[in-house]
Amino acid sequence: MVRPAAFGYNEETASSNVFQKNRTGDDRQVRARVWKEFDGAVERLRDSGIEVLVWEDRPEPAKPDAIFPNNWFSTHRDGTLVLYPLEARVRRHERDPDLVSWLVEASAPRRVLDLSALENEGLYLEGTGSLVLDRPARVAYCALSSRSHPSTLARWAGEMGYSTVTFRTDDGHGHAVYHTNVVMSVGTRIACVVEEAIPARDERQRVRASLEASGHGVHALDLEAMRALGANALELRAREGPLWVLSTRAWAHLPVPVRRALEQEIHVLPIDVATIEEVGGGGIRCMLAELFLP
């Protein structure tokens, strides 16, 4: 997790991320609330048995979205560290060479797959924002958008040995949803999908069929839940078993039958990141970069 130094509303990303809201007021007050939420999230995760490594962002250059590191790198059990091409120019400063060096020194990855140069060609793929991974089945789900280009996805899948399931989305107002992890989340045995946001029936059926083929129970969410980032969740492995992590707002907006089902299937950990969600347009899942390197 990256503790932000200059969190704020990002005008450059707002055109494709309708979840962001430009909250008026004192930037210092907003950042104070964000730091409180961030530190509280770290504490909640650690108290639940999750090992959390916190990287301190530097104030210059200002990086309003540094709190979302999962968009620019991912790690994998086969020893691969992947660096991704980002759409917004201001976000490209988030690829911190010191953090990359630390990851390399700490884990000695077998290879570094650097796709970042593709952003100069407009071929974006924003990490595990664009990619929702079923890692055991080696299936990558991807909602195509301005931030997720099919040719970059194909190259990533070829390099990583994954099959892909792609689909188009509609947020209910005629716009593509900016990231896949806002539309769906995939755990070990559980998946949550905003099926209402996938207008093409064949694509919707293909997503569900793929998940069911890999043994997942699929919980359908509605657009109201999506707008509260209800699908922006991540399964983590804690001391006492798997943990379904999402925001308190997301949890409150899940359909009651889904909440009851999740409570019976997995331990649920709601975390309050309300200011981060409102101003940054991303939830707790976006704040977590999973470390799978040996």
Image (cartoon, helix red, strand yellow):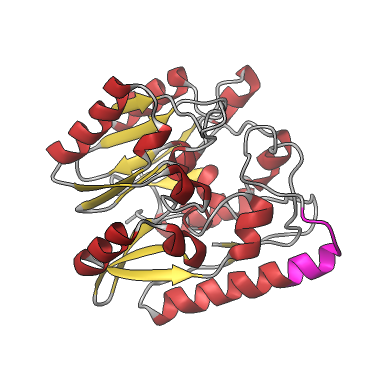
Q: Nearer the viewer, residue 172 or 13?
A: 172
- 99, above or below 48, in the image: above
Left/right of residue 151 with respect to residue 79 in the rendered view? right
How many numbered tags mark residues here?
0
Q: Which is the main secondary structure of the residues drawn in magenta? A: helix
Q: Position of residue 265 (x, y in %)?
A: 20, 64
Left/right of residue 221 with respect to residue 65 in the rendered view? left
Q: Position of residue 117 (x, y in %)?
A: 59, 26
> What residue appears at the point 56 percent right and 26 percent down from the top-left corner?
174
Give the magenta part as a residue range: 23-32
Residue that extends furthest to the bottom in the rendered view of this protein: 47
Q: Nearer the viewer, residue 86 or 244?
A: 244
Quarter residue 242 falls in? bottom left
The stretch drawn in magenta includes residue 24: yes
The reply to whether residue 162 is visible in this rendering is no
Q: Nearer the viewer, residue 239 or 205?
A: 205
The reply to whether residue 85 is visible in this rendering is yes
Q: Nearer the viewer, residue 65 or 271?
A: 271
